[in-house]
Image (cartoon, helix red, strand yellow):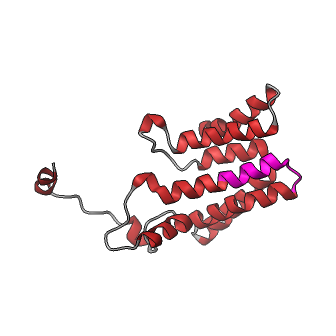
């Protein structure tokens, strides 16, 4: 599970480094791995959130940023605001990479990583906005909280299934 996904994020940059590739190529290989997980061609350009792949990416290319992301994640657990904390940690990652002396390509890679995470949240595998809600508000909730509505309990509440009659009428 999780360790395999971390490995999928860490191995491309490490293998590129081992083969003598430039720092920029190492970053691009890691970002390609994350984008491939987020928008898999095998799943119709749908996929996961890429968080564990991102952990591997940061482990290989910007360990200080991974430490920052971990602190943000633990703070999110304590405050029960994990999605907000994780996007904040990813947004902070280029700053931490720069302050820790990582090469400019790693700093840019951390910025691109945050942009990929934000794009994936907002896109939400093509899910439409809830009925009656303005699209910009849905995008804001997705960007900050990784859900379509502000109320967490409403988001987690089970949704009624459409009846068989409604389903056959739509076919």
* Quadrant where the N terminus is found in the figure: top right
Q: Nearer the viewer, residue 146 or 154?
A: 146
| Residue 81 magenta-highlighted | no
What residue appears at the point 45 percent right and 42 percent down from the top-left corner? 45
| Residue 110 magenta-highlighted | yes
Q: Nearer the viewer, residue 134 or 121?
A: 134
What residue appears at the point 23 percent right and 58 percent down from the top-left corner? 161
Is residue 68 depicted above or below 144 in this figure? Answer: above
Q: Nearer the viewer, residue 81 or 116?
A: 116
Outermost residue on the right side: it is: 101
Is any atom of residue 62 visible in this view? no
Main secondary structure of the magenta stretch: helix
What residue appears at the point 46 percent right and 64 percent down from the top-left corner? 147
* Percent position of residue 79, x then y: 61, 72
Is any atom of residue 97 visible in this view? yes
Q: How many marks?
A: 0
Query: What is the magenta range?
Result: 100-113
């Amino acid at each position: 599970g999780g360790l395999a996904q971390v490995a999928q994020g860490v191995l491309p940059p490490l293998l590129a480094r081992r083969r003598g590739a430039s720092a920029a190529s190492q970053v691009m290989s890691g970002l390609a791995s994350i984008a491939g997980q987020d928008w898999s061609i095998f799943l119709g350009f749908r996929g996961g959130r890429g968080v564990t792949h991102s952990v591997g990416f940061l482990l290989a290319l910007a360990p200080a940023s991974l430490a920052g992301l971990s602190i943000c994640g633990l703070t999110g657990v304590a405050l029960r605001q994990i999605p907000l904390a994780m996007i904040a940690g990813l947004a902070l990652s280029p700053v931490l990479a720069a302050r820790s002396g990582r090469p400019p390509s790693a700093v840019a890679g951390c910025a691109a990583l945050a942009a990929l995470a934000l794009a994936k949240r907002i896109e939400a595998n093509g899910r439409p906005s809830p009925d009656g809600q303005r699209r910009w508000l849905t995008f804001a909730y997705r960007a900050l909280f990784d859900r379509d509505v502000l109320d967490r309990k409403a988001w987690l509440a089970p949704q009624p299934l459409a009846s068989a009659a409604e389903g056959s009428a739509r076919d």
